[in-house]
Image (spheres, rainbow, N blue to C red):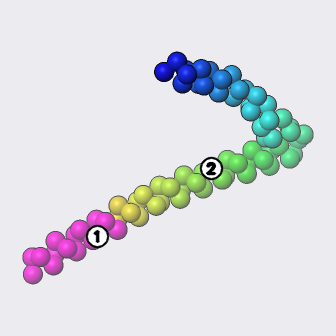
Amino acid sequence: MHFCYRIFLVILILLPIQAIACPYCFSSNGEDSIKAYIGTTLALIALLVVLFGSVAFFVYKNYKKAHSVGESKED
């Protein structure tokens, strides 16, 4: 337990160093940084749409499958 705590502290201390290397935050030279922010935002929005769309499709497909099995048993 004590060893895991030390590893956690080392990781926590090194995380701010990784944030300094962020290309979007520290390359702010006008129009390029605005394009980078917009591109990243659009990519994350697209990721959410694909994620929620996949879940909705999975639920719909399973609902239709379960509903069609129920109808065939009634006949």
The quarter of the picture where residue 62 lies is: bottom left
Give the side of residue 48 with respect to residue 40, left or right. left
**Magenta segment:** 61-75
Residue at the disc numbered 1: 64
Kind of residue indicated by mark 2: Leu
The residue at 58%/54% (across/down) is 47
The residue at 86%/47% (across/down) is 32
Residue 33 colored in magenta in the image: no
Q: Can you give x and y, in whole percent of width and height, for residue 35 in the image?
A: 80, 49
The quarter of the picture where residue 61 lies is: bottom left
Please tell me how crowded label 2 is: few (under 14), some (14-19), or many (20+) other residues with Cα within 10 Å. few
Q: Residue furthest right?
A: 29
Q: Secondary structure at mark 1?
A: helix
Distance from Cα at disc 2 to Cα at disc 1: 30 Å
The residue at 9%/81% (across/down) is 75
Kind of residue indicated by mark 1: Lys
Q: Earlier in the sequence, mark 2 or mark 1?
A: 2
- Of residues 3 and 44, the one nearer the viewer is 3
The quarter of the picture where residue 68 lies is: bottom left
Q: How many marks?
A: 2
- Of residues 57 and 20, the one nearer the viewer is 20
Give the side of residue 54 with respect to residue 19, left or right. left
Q: Is residue 12 visible?
A: no
Give the side of residue 44 with respect to residue 62, left or right. right
Residue at the disc numbered 2: 44
Q: Secondary structure at mark 2?
A: helix
Return the mark for residue 43. Answer: none
Please tell me how crowded label 1 is: few (under 14), some (14-19), or many (20+) other residues with Cα within 10 Å. few
